[in-house]
Structure formats: C-alpha cells, structure tokens
Amino acid sequence: MDRRNFLSAVAASASVTATGCIGDNGNTALSPPENYEMLSEADLPRPLYGERIPEATVEAPLRGTDPSTRGFVGERHVLMTFIYTRCTEVCLSLTSNLVQAQVDATEEGYSDEIVFLPTTFDPAHDTADVLRRYGEERGADLDAENWYFLRPDGEKRAREVVEDTFGVGYERNPPDAAMEFTHTSMILLANRDGYVERAYTGTPPNPAELVDDVRTVVDGFS
C-alpha cells in the first residue's frame, strides 16, 4: 500500500455497529451497518460486511501451529485484530476488546464456538516470549483453546498479511518518534461460515457493543 492509499484508508476508517437478528443476505447474522452502501462503493482495501474472510496462514508461536484464518470455517466464529506490543495507545484498546469478548465467551458458555486472533505486524520485536508476557499483562487466557497470537515470519510476510491481505495500513516512524508505527486499526468479526459480520475501524468499538454483536452472531448460528 503506497502512502496515498494508506492515508485514504486512515480517512475512511469509520464503522457503525447497527445489528439485527437475521442478516439480509443469508450469510450473516447481523444486518448491514448503516454506512454499508457508502463503504461498498469506496473501493477500500479491507474486507467488508458479507465478504469472505481473507485467507492467510500465519504462525501461532504459543500454540506451535500455523493456522489459516479460514481454517476455522465450519467450526468457529473469528474475532481478529492487528497490533504491535510496544504500542501504548489504540492497540491496548484493540486487545482489551478481544479479552473482554473472551471473558464473556467463558462466562456465557460459548468459548468453544469462537477463536481470537490478535496478529502482530512487528515480528522482529514481538517474539513468542514478548507475546506471552503481553497477553498475560492484558488479561488474556492464554491457556484457553481459543486464543492464538499470530506472528508473521518476518517483515515482508507481515506486510503481505496485515496490509496486503487485510488492508490494515502501517508505516514505521522515524527513530526519534514517540511511537514505532503509525497505523490504521481494525477488529474483524467473521462468522463460522467464513463471512465478515463487522469490520470495526477507526476508534475501537465500545466493548459492550462488540460483545453484543458477538453474542448475536453466536445465537444466529446456534
């Protein structure tokens, strides 16, 4: 993604979380977001409501496996986001949203129906040990069978997965900058049939709204 497209993606990062009991297209549990028509005409690089979740196979170092983002189709819903662990701003909220959804899944008895895929785009720094420590500090249950930290193999692969495949733009800042990266943000919710229910971009959603959407999707496929 060149700088012009990156900045366009930043400007277009907005989401709405309108929900419904049954989707309009037969593939989703949520109804289209209010701004769906505008987004579908904007030629955005990221996946949109009702589209298939993009496919990428990425190492999960704490699991010792290389899962595919489509490998859970037919079995589990997917909640995915893109972070780097040195981030002290939006990445904390993105991770917190996934953690709170994981807690709700455990408390409400659907933990085996969903998988959480936080994905780093800073693999040189975010080693397995760093990811483990970060997850523990953020309150994720790393022993649960539904939490997979994904770590692309090198900077080139990170760019292919995060930016080229999922449309989350990022740029490394100059050495004297306060933050290592400038980046767009996204939480992606896809149902177990492999269709995108929501792509929350810009400011992370209210955790209660996200959990409500997740519950609606789970109930819609029960």
Image: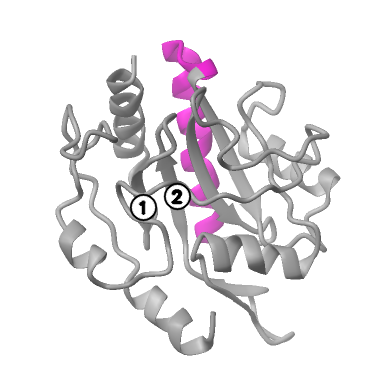
Residue 95 position in % (x across, y down): 55, 45
Dot 2 surroundings within 10 Å: few (below 14), some, or many (20 or more)?
A: many
Report if residue 97 lies within the magenta region: yes
Q: Which residue is denoted by mark 1 in the rendering?
A: 200
Q: Say what secondary structure mark 1 lies in.
A: strand
> How far is mark 1 from mark 2, CA to CA?
5 Å
Question: Which residue lies at the image location 38% right of the left edge and 81% below the top edge?
Answer: 8
Where does the magenta region start and end? 89-112
Asked if 207 appears above or below 39 in the picture, the reply is: above
The majority secondary structure of the magenta stretch comes to helix
Residue 106 position in % (x across, y down): 51, 16
Q: Which residue is denoted by mark 2 in the rendering?
A: 187
The reply to whether the C-beta atoms of the residues labelled 1 and 2 are less than 8 Å apart is: yes
> Which quadrant would the N terminus be assigned to in this image?
bottom right
In this rendered view, identify the residue nearer to me: 175 or 121.
Answer: 121
Q: Earlier in the sequence, mark 1 or mark 2?
A: 2
Residue 107 position in % (x across, y down): 46, 14
Asked if 198 appears above or below 185 in the picture, the reply is: above
> Which quadrant would the C terminus be assigned to in this image?
top left
In this rendered view, identify the residue nearer to me: 65 or 169.
Answer: 65
